[in-house]
Amino acid sequence: MRALLKGRNIGVLAGILAILPVCFWPLRKTTDMEFWERLLDAGHLPFFAVLAGLFFFLARAVVQSATRAAWLALAASVTIAAGIELIQPLAGRSASLTDFLNGVAGALLFGVGVAVHAQGGGRARLLVYLALCVIVTVAVFRPPWLEFKGILWRRANFPVLGDFETAPELRLWVGQGGTDTSQTRLSLSTNAVTRGTFGLRIDAAQGDWGGVTYSAGEMDWSSYSVLRFDLFNPGTAFRLGVRVSDDGDCSAIGKRFDRELEVPSGWTHVRITSEDIKHGPKNRLLNLRSIRRLTLFGGQNQPARTFYLDAACLE
């Protein structure tokens, strides 16, 4: 213990204590949540690689063997990774197996790097290790990259909200509603199309509020007069809610734009004016300069149903 409390070790211990609270910091982003959540998931890889490095530095003050110090650092990092996921629900965050595995991967990469350095083996072994680092890093950061491609698509194609011709734009549309055992599924389809080759097939789950949400990214809708989209219903008529949320308090009906549509069998071509959307809230004007979400959803206790969406845009 005395060895740990000497010189630079105190600074390292302070560094560990300073960075650990980051793992419990609440995520306050209100738009593009899928991207930020996937990025934080991936961030556990470099975070725990650094943490393992700090523990390794401390372990070297106690043991002479670099390999043994690496094992101690790995054990400490994995223990903390598991402990964080167990404690996070108490701090308003959710436990995540992905976060834990990414943290373990980061600690392992550091440990393998120490082993490669300690055992030698020359250029070939180093290249294999670097290749492993690249492969693992690419695999871990692929999910946030795919989400980011959706954000890039939105910026490049606005005021088009959904043409459904490419995979990246599907990242902007997220199925919602249903139950723990019945989830809404989204896919590209050629069955019902009004523009291009594909439309969006929405297999709305049985249960409450089954439908789809578009991440609008706080884009400015104020220069456009109409929100339009095409729906195709292959089954019997049903009612569909349309909700538009801005950067204000949209937590309840009357605080955002809400409208209920009757969707008969066949095609329905929806046109909603920007003036109607702006005047949706009861006690304020919706901020068309910062729209966060567009949601299409069924009601409570709804049966599973399939419908199609295409040509969603502003005009």
Image (tube, helix red, strand yellow):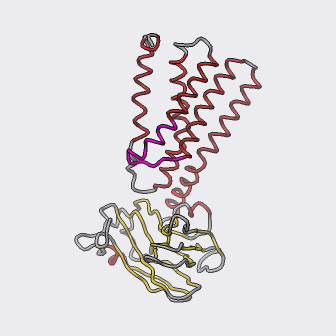
Image location of residue 186, percent across then percent down:
58, 68
For residue 243, what is the image quadrant?
A: bottom left
In front of the other: 57 or 191: 57
* Whether residue 306 is situated above or below residue 120 in the rendered picture: below
Image location of residue 235, percent across then percent down:
57, 86
* Whether residue 31 is situated above or below residue 179 in the rendered picture: above
- Residue 103 in magenta? no
Magenta residues span 81-96
Q: What residue do we see at 60% from left, 74% from top?
A: 199
In front of the other: 216 or 140: 140
Is residue 303 rendered to the left or right of residue 91? Answer: right
Q: What residue do we see at 53% from left, 56% from top?
A: 152
**Residue 313 shows in this picture:** no
In front of the other: 8 or 311: 8
Quarter that holds the N terminus? top left
- Residue 91 in magenta? yes
Q: What residue do we see at 24% from left, 69% from top?
A: 284
Q: Main secondary structure of the magenta part?
A: helix
Image location of residue 191, percent across then percent down:
65, 79
**Residue 98 shows in this picture:** yes
* Whether residue 75 is situated above or below residue 254 in the rendered picture: above
Is residue 174 rendered to the left or right of residue 71? Answer: left
